[in-house]
Amino acid sequence: MNTTTASTASSPAFPAGAYSIRQLPINLYGAVMGLAGMALAWRLAVPAFGAPAAVGEAMGFFALAVFIAHSAGYLTKLALHTDAVRKEFTDPVSGNFFGQFAISLLLLSSVLMPYGQAFAQGLWTAGLVVTFALGLLTGSRLLQGKLAAAHMLPVWIIPGVGVLDIGVTGGHMPMAWAGEINLLAMAVGAMVALVLWTLIIHRLAHGEPLPLGMRPSLMILMAPFAVGFLAWVNVFGQVDRFAGALFYFALFVFVVVSPKVFRRDVPFSPGWWAVSFPMAALASAAIVYSEAHGGAVLHGLAGVLLAVLTLALAVLTVRTLHWVFSGKLFAT
């Protein structure tokens, strides 16, 4: 056999060093958030629509598997490329994505609650500690001054929404201190999210339009209201008029931003997962609201939102797996 031919045949299709765990983005925790949120929405669909219970439970365990896989990959990145992780964490934009890790812990605690209450309670406690710590860091960064207006993007809302998620996932926690923590989370999360939402809208209205690659993050603008609805209902135990106002404004924001997000010219990237959890929160809110107030229109709307959410996340999952196995996710 010709040695040159053999050498060429055995060489990789891409040059050495073309792929690296260094390129693994922190924002893939958005996939965990979206999948866990969808699992919880399908769990609500069991009594609301008679949906098979196995669907939501399977989605929940898939979310857990994605969390474990991504955490293993990111810990490897931390060990091998500490400087890259430090750069992500201190960046005024990508640093906010670390809030997705905390939210993932909170959501997974709800997913796993039926299978082990003690473990779920421990996971929720760890999640709230990390969430509050990142919330404090966000407040500190916001008040240090000299923050470029161009950096005031929708992803800044993530830590504030994370604090609200403490109430969403902790409404039924049995610990004696959980009630006060949930009330604290409602107060802090609502105010932080509202302040950041206002600053971001000001930047979007007066600054340059977002680049196409960042357009999916516009869906995060809906999250404070959809998540706020769920937190309010879980903490206070009622779907009152204020909760209804939160739901309807979340629906309004969804209708406004969807044409700007779901466009053929927006390229695919892991950043697309930014749409997943806000849509999951809206679907869950719609189911809860329709169950409380009834009516064919509300039930139909909740069903449509759940179907759209499921289709969107199925597409995102397939395209992300293609990126993983083709190497695009790790390309340098």
Image (tube, grey):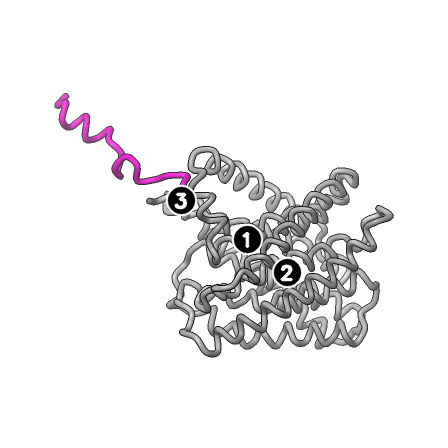
**What quarter of the picture does the N terminus occupy?**
top left
- x, y percent for residue 43: 72, 54
Membership of 31 in magenta stretch: no
Q: Reading the chain from its start, which is encountered first: label 2 or label 1?
A: 1
Instruction: Specify the quadrant that holds the C terminus.
Output: top left
The amino acid beneath tag 2 is Val
Rounded to the nearest angstrom, the CA distance separating label 2 from label 3 is 26 Å
Q: Residues within 10 Å of mark 3 (few under 14, many from 20)?
A: some
The residue singled out by tag 2 in the image is 161
Q: Which label was assigned to residue 23?
A: 3
Residue at image x 48%, y 54%?
Answer: 94
Q: Which residue appears at 37% of the width and 39% of the height?
A: 20
**Could you tell whether 28 is left or right of 44 in the image?**
left
Please report whichever mark, 2 or 3, sits nearer to the chain's N-terminal start.
3
Instruction: Please provide percent x and percent y for residue 103.
Output: 63, 52
The answer to whether residue 54 shows anywhere in this view is: no
Amino acid type at mark 1? Gly
Report the residue at 41% width, 48% height from top.
Answer: 323
Q: Position of residue 125 (x, y in %)?
A: 73, 44
Characterize the local packing of mark 2: few (<14), some (14-19) or many (20 or more) Cα atoms within 10 angstroms: many
Q: Is residue 8 magenta?
A: yes
Provide the residue span drawn in magenta. Answer: 1-22
**Comes first in the chain, label 3 or label 1:** 3
Q: Secondary structure at mark 1?
A: helix
Classed neighbour count for the residue bearing mark 1: other residues with Cα under 10 Å, few (<14), some (14–19), many (≥20)? many
Residue occupying image coordinates x 50% and y 51%? 27
Q: Quadrant of residue 190?
A: bottom right
Q: Helix, strand, or loop for circle 3?
A: helix
